[in-house]
Image (cartoon, grey):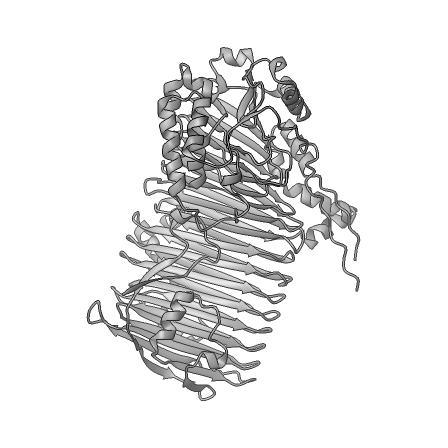
Amino acid sequence: MNNISINKLPVPTWTWLKVNEYKVAVPDKFEKTESVIDTMPEEVKVGKVDFTSVCLGDVELGAGEDFRKISHMAKTGGDSYTVAAGVKVAEPIRITYDYGKSSDDNAAGKLSRTAIVLGEGAELTVVMTFKGCPKFGANDIRIKAAPTAKLNLIEIFQLEEGSNFVDSIGGRYLEKGGLSLIQIKSGKGNMALSCSADLDGYKSTLDIDTGYLVTGDDKLDINYVARHRGAKTDTKISVSGVLRDRADKTFRGTIDFIKGCKTATGDEREDVLLMDEGVHNNTVPLILCAEEDVEGAHGASIGKISEEVLNYFASRGIAEDDVTELMAKSRIDAVAGRIPDAVTRDLLLSEE
Amino acid sequence: MADKEKTYVEDVDRSIYDFRNVDEDVYKVAEGLTPEIVRQISKEKNDPEWMLELRLKSLDIYNNMEMKPWGPPIDGLHMDNIVTYIKPKDNKMSADWDEVPEEIKDTFERLGIPQAERESLAGVGAQYDSELVYHNVREEVAAQGVIYTDLESAMHGEYGDMIREHFMKLITPQDHKFAALHGAVWSGGSFVYVPPGVKVEIPLQSYFRLNAPGAGQFEHTLIIVDEGADLHFIEGCSAPKYNVANLHAGAVELFVGKNARLRYSTIENWSKNMYNLNTKRATVEEGGKMEWVSGSFGSHTSYLYPMTILKGDDAKVEFTGITFAGEGQNLDTGMKVVHTGKRTVSTVNTKSISKSGGISTFRSAVVIGPEAKGAKSAVDCSSLMLDDISRSDTVPAMDVRCADVDIGHEAKIGRISDEAIFYLMSRGISEEDARAMIVSGFADNVSKELPLEYAVEMNNLIRLEMKGSIG
């Protein structure tokens, strides 16, 4: 196993806070992850992944350069999904990745690699569900959106206790192109989520909506970076989650207004519900600004359920324990309720 | 279409601070940093043995500590070129203004310090280069048992044990490289002790002037406000501009007792060749309150993050700050607070303005320990960009290890809002005046926290002259 640093803050801060990066141990060997394609619309051209040939070899990755090297050297192959210009795909791609159960600590890591390339005006929804219990599993998604192309990407993490997982998304968005990303982390295990977006084109957009539940001794590490280069670009990041038991979570969100992104806007929010005394929360929301004509904001709210809310429910005969369970579930459900694919949404909302 | 004329905000006017005295007949150590130089300073200061040991240990830590991988570059600062100790000629710390050497007296007269003392202060300390040259406290304040003197004298007097118990205990040489440097070569600074229950009605002030080119100033301020006592302490600093780097690596250690209150106000106006690598830290006991008011206007490069440890239950801190970064300045400022006591409260309100290529970074850390049940924290920071050649970054962090807390953080960045200008213009105010009002109002929350004479100084510092035309 080798230690690598991922999810680095674009601008580091005090080292004693231990939030500048996340270290993970990765195995020496990798295998391709098994996947089951539940639905694959015929408008989507499926091929073998070659990031370089579709100009995604050098796109900034959410997890960073150490992860890029691992992904590059793993040589596990992968898939590419291409939608031609002007094609709006109605049916989502639905894929379930099974990372299996690692036999021992020296088992090969499991890696999936995906390129998504959208032609001008194309639209696509991709739903990825991740299952299994890998000692080390990873997912490398790279996206290229031509002008006015839109991608809805929904990732549902239902991994098992004892798993270690890295999810990395990197993408480049041209004029009026954009990514709408929903991530739901409801399973167990240690997890690092990340998304990097280069909003190069005029009016390109990034919209992230994340819900998480972290329990036991699990760790969750999140790193989102939006680089605004185009004028009138827009980022919205909304993260809502629940920490229980001795869970440990770090959220990094960076909105980077690069000189020239006139009238760009960016907003990031995190709302964290702390349910038990042993939890540990880090929230690090950055705004970097080299352009005068922009509007950026970030906000965070961290704590337990307020006395007012508890009193409200108590006055209606609902016990405090029931209220906390209700509030915790509602955070995940609220994000699930915004999934544009009805099949996936209904499936998640029907789960206990 | 012609470009809209930009709102123009003038640079901070530093001419009133930018005068210098010729550096002659002074005693100074050689440039650089060696054990011999540290021993020389210690001998000059007549240090007790424990202080010499602390200095040498600090030097060792400094030599073996790496610079951290964050913050603005300090490539232009070369310790081999810095003189760490300069004693003004004819120096003798005095409580009589007439005994202060004429040239130095003239410097402080021009800065308005004696006038301020006469009109609105309970006591004044004035440091020139590495040494205190004047210290005085009003009789009625001294009669209350308030001690306000230079640290070196106090160390050899009846408060020697108290100083040894507190000196560099909050800021230790291990904290960071420039805290270690401070421990090795510190000189000058003030010691304040306010006895239990004593409320000092009007502020004490220390003013630090660094006159010599290529020099460092390393004053140490130690304030102990005992149980139930109350104090407002003001710190001011300035220097003339030189073409070589100057260094300020002072340390401020503040001990706020049970149910005591301390307000610490600073207007930092070092010249633009100054590397301001200052460290300030306070600890607050049960029911005590710490208030920081901080204005950062000067320096080439600043690292400044006053830290508060809310140790006692129900302790509180309020931090109000403004940073104005103009041409050639890279000001990395902010605050840190650590909550360890129950029901502790922190409230932070900061503003930053960047213009003419200036770089402003707000950096903060709110740390909530596992025992800090019922803790509350609210941080609000706003940044204003006045042109597109400047930069403004916000780098906050919240580390929470207790569930029973209420932590909030809000930040925003942008330029002067068109809607606000339109609103004011719709009420008959010209666009020029509307822009001026908005920028002035942006800094208002800090100036209203300052005592009157300092608010006036701040208004002098930010001379916001707005001109514009509708494009």
**Would you identify the image quadrant in which residue A177 lies?**
bottom right
Name the residue located 40 percent from the left edge and 49 percent from the top edge: A15
Q: Visible in this render: residue A57?
A: yes
Towards the viewer: A37 or B157: B157
The correct choice, above or below, for B102 with respect to B295 in the image is: above
Towards the viewer: A9 or A318: A9
Name the residue located 41 percent from the left edge and 77 percent from the top edge: A114
Towards the viewer: B161 or B192: B161
Farthest-out residue, left: A104
Task: Indicate left or right for B274 with A54 as reference.
Answer: right
The correct choice, above or below, for A195 with respect to A150 in the image is: above
User: Residue B451 location, x and y as percent?
Assistant: 61, 28
User: Residue B37 location, x and y as percent?
Assistant: 45, 31
**Would you identify the image quadrant in which residue B50 lies?**
top left
User: Residue A46 location, x and y as percent?
Assistant: 42, 86
Quarter holding the N terminus of chain A is bottom left
User: Residue A128 location, x and y as percent?
Assistant: 38, 75
